[in-house]
Image (spheres, rainbow, N blue to C red):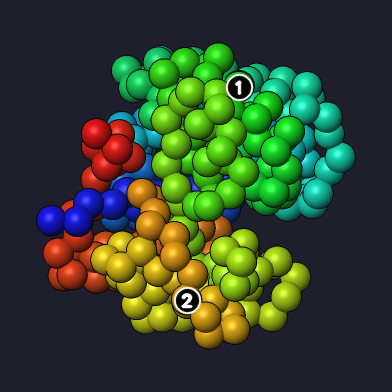
Amino acid sequence: MNVIDLNSDLGESFGAWTMGNDSDVLRYVSSANVACGFHAGDPQVMIATARAAAKAGVAVGAHPGHSDLVGFGRRQMALSADEAYAITLYQIGAMSAVCRAQGLGLQHVKPHGALYNQAAKDTALAEAIAQAVRDGGDLILLGLANSAFERAAAKTGIPFAAEAFADRAYRADGTLLPRGEAGAVIHDVTLAVERTVLMATEGVVIAADGSSVRLSPHSICLHGDTTEAVAMAREIRKGLEAAGVAVRPLKEVLS
């Protein structure tokens, strides 16, 4: 039987502002990437999200991003490798403490938004993030398949999990179509299910130009901040299981 992790970016509310339907999404995913207060989230939201994940039996990962609440961490910011290391380690530490208080172990680290996209192409940034993951504990680095993340993890000696996206369009080179371009975010639930099953069973995604890109992911992400998030999570889970793919937390997929 094929096995894959299904993850979602959660815990992105802040103060009086609410984003997403985390409790409903948690019913269908196996891992949650929890915002650590830089691009989204706050200490109380972090605690509540970890508590909800524990109740749902969902593994928790840290989701560190740029210090950019206004831009939701999706604006590119110039930072050195030392800065990337520091902000990543800082956010891992915060999320680790939150998980420990809930009787959970932190499973993985997945950078968010612009930090993710920048480091996927930038060796120095990817290595700085990998070093923070190494120094933050016994953790898995979750990053874009076939990217600088994978090479950085190998160099640093930490476990790496390749990620693909159910609700994002790809270029032919395996990078994500920028959000500012038409069709970058997929809202069609049926299409997202079809793409996810293809990625999980054949390790392939169809790029925006119609070409096939080989990914072989360990984990597939769906974003928790879209209006279709709950329906997409439910139908993707059903589609994977109907195709004979078991959904399990990342540590089990890599074991």
Indicate whether 128 appears above or below 145.
Answer: above
Quarter assignment of residue 193: bottom left
Indicate whether 152 appears above or below 217.
Answer: above
| Type of amino acid at the residue the image marks with label 2 | Ser
Residue at 48%, 23% (x, y): give it: 157
Looking at the figure, which quarter contains the N terminus?
bottom left
Residue at 24%, 70% (x, y): give it: 239
Q: Nearer the viewer, mark 1 or mark 2?
A: 2
| Type of amino acid at the residue the image marks with label 1 | Gln
Closer to the N terminus: mark 1 or mark 2? 1
Element at label 1: helix
Which numbered dot is residue 163?
A: none
Give the residue number, with chain letter if any, for mark 1. 131
Indicate whether 244 appears above or below 9.
Answer: below
Mark 1 and mark 2 in contact? Answer it, CB < 8 Å. no
The answer to whether any part of residue 35 appears in the image is no
Which numbered dot is residue 212?
A: 2
The answer to whether any part of residue 31 appears in the image is yes
Residue at 16%, 70% (x, y): give it: 242
Looking at the figure, which quarter contains the C terminus?
top left
Q: Residue farthest to the right?
A: 78
Query: Percent position (x, y) of residue 217?
Result: 39, 54
Element at label 2: strand
Q: Is residue 64 left or right of residue 66?
A: left
- How packed mark 1 is, by other alpha carbons closer than 10 Å (few <14, some 14-19, many 20 or more), is many
Please state which of residues 74 and 170 is positioned toward the viewer in this rendering: 170
